[in-house]
Image: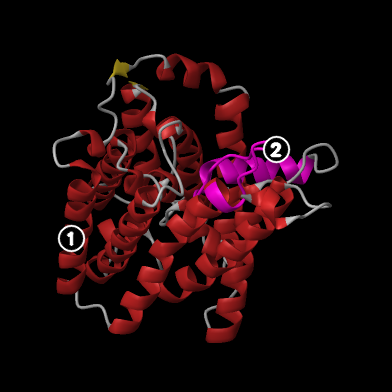
């Protein structure tokens, strides 16, 4: 469709960066106001309302994504979520590691990106370490481990999606959306929060359709992408270091947009404030969590947004397994921390 716009000096990739910035700014603003975070939805003190917000977003992401598929605008047939050989070991282990990491850092990567935009220096350092480790897992020192674990697969054939089950996409997508909305209705969140959470969810199909339909150019194709932070963080790190040789893509624009949106919202509505680490022990905990999320996000095939909010609406079983294992890892780690004695701080 992109070629019909008549742009002569703009490529689909360049346009995708601008599009990603817009999507990212909107997510950053909405995420800052609603405190959108999967970790909070699982183990936060306000987890009931936080889960209501997260699940409302998921419901609208599912409905919007499957509507776009039904209209023929996009298809996930060739997407990595639908590969028949599912690397179950990598996904399960990666999910557990990511879940543990986000509890140690007190935030999923999307939340930490928003916090970084609102002046939280802990979140900034976590994102840097996360991006370095994710890039090392994708293309560097840890890549052999990723390849070895990714080679342990189960051939699912055509049954890689809930849409292949009796009842089809609308039945299973409808059940997910309905269950999410029922919980959200009982969580007690207000109408304003519902509207903002729904808007966050609709950014998912907006991004899928934008990159997979509106910006589609058969002569200069780009990847169909939506909200995600693992690959974009690694791409942004690489682009920052070698921007003269590596052009920016959707992920770079998305990350920059989220940081900008969070900054705008925190300055406009309150919430901006410089924060840093309180002790060496806290620093070590956050760095360990960042590293676990970097490895885990790559092995699992995405973070709480990439595999969760964006992945589940595709009805991919791999994405569903990933977000379930992230939740298991988070709950288990939180339980261990609750019953573990606090580490002693030594001075010297």
x then y, percent, for residue 110: 48, 56
Q: Classify mark 2: helix, strand or loop.
A: loop
- Magenta-tinted stretch: 213-241
Residue at the location (40% across, 53% down)?
Answer: 68
x then y, percent, for residue 153: 34, 17
Q: Does the magenta stretch include residue 342?
A: no
Q: Who is closer to the viewer here, 303 or 320?
A: 320
- Position of residue 113 relative to residue 30, above or below, is above
Q: Which residue lies furthest to the bottom in this view?
A: 269
- Position of residue 193 relative to residue 255, above or below, is below
Which numbered circle lies on residue 220?
Answer: 2
Distance from disc 2 to disc 1, alpha carbons, whole Å, reads: 39 Å
Query: Label 1, on which residue?
Result: 178
Judge left or right: residue 257 versus residue 115.
Answer: right
Residue at the location (32% across, 33% down)?
Answer: 318
Q: Earlier in the sequence, mark 2 or mark 1?
A: 1
Please indicate, yes or no, whether residue 72 appears anywhere in the rendered image: yes
x then y, percent, for residue 43: 27, 58
- Position of residue 275 relative to residue 137, above or below, is below
- Position of residue 273 relative to residue 241, above or below, is below
Q: Who is closer to the viewer here, 234 or 343?
A: 234
């Amino acid at each position: 469709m992109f070629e019909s716009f008549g742009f002569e000096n703009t490529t689909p990739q360049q346009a995708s960066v601008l599009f990603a910035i817009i999507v990212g700014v909107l997510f950053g603003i909405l995420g800052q106001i609603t405190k959108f975070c999967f970790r909070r939805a699982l183990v936060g003190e306000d987890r009931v309302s936080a889960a209501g917000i997260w699940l409302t977003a998921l419901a609208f992401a599912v409905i919007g994504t499957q509507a776009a598929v039904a209209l023929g605008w996009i298809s996930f047939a060739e997407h990595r979520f639908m590969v028949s050989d599912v690397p179950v070991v990598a996904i399960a282990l990666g999910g557990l590691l990511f879940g543990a990491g986000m509890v140690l850092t007190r935030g999923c990567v999307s939340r930490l990106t928003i916090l970084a935009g609102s002046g939280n220096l802990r979140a900034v350092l976590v994102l840097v370490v996360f991006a370095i480790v994710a890039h090392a897992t994708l293309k560097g020192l840890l890549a052999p481990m990723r390849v070895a674990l990714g080679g342990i697969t189960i051939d699912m054939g055509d049954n890689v999606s809930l849409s292949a089950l009796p009842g089809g996409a609308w039945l299973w997508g409808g059940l997910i959306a309905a269950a999410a909305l029922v919980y959200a209705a009982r969580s007690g969140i207000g109408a304003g929060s519902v509207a903002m959470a729904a808007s966050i969810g609709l950014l998912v199909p907006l991004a899928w359709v934008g990159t997979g339909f509106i910006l589609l150019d058969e002569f200069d194709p780009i990847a169909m992408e939506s909200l995600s932070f693992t690959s974009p963080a690694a791409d942004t790190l690489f682009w920052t270091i070698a921007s003269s040789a590596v052009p920016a893509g959707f992920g770079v624009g998305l990350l920059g947009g989220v940081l900008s949106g969070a900054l705008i919202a925190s300055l406009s509505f309150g919430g901006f404030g410089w924060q840093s680490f309180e002790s060496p022990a806290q620093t070590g905990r956050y760095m360990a969590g960042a590293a676990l999320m970097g490895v885990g996000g790559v092995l699992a095939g995405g973070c709480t947004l990439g595999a969760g909010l964006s992945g589940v609406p595709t009805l991919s079983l791999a994405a569903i397994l990933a977000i379930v294992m992230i939740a298991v890892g988070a709950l288990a780690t939180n339980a261990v921390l609750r019953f573990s004695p606090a580490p002693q701080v030594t001075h010297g």
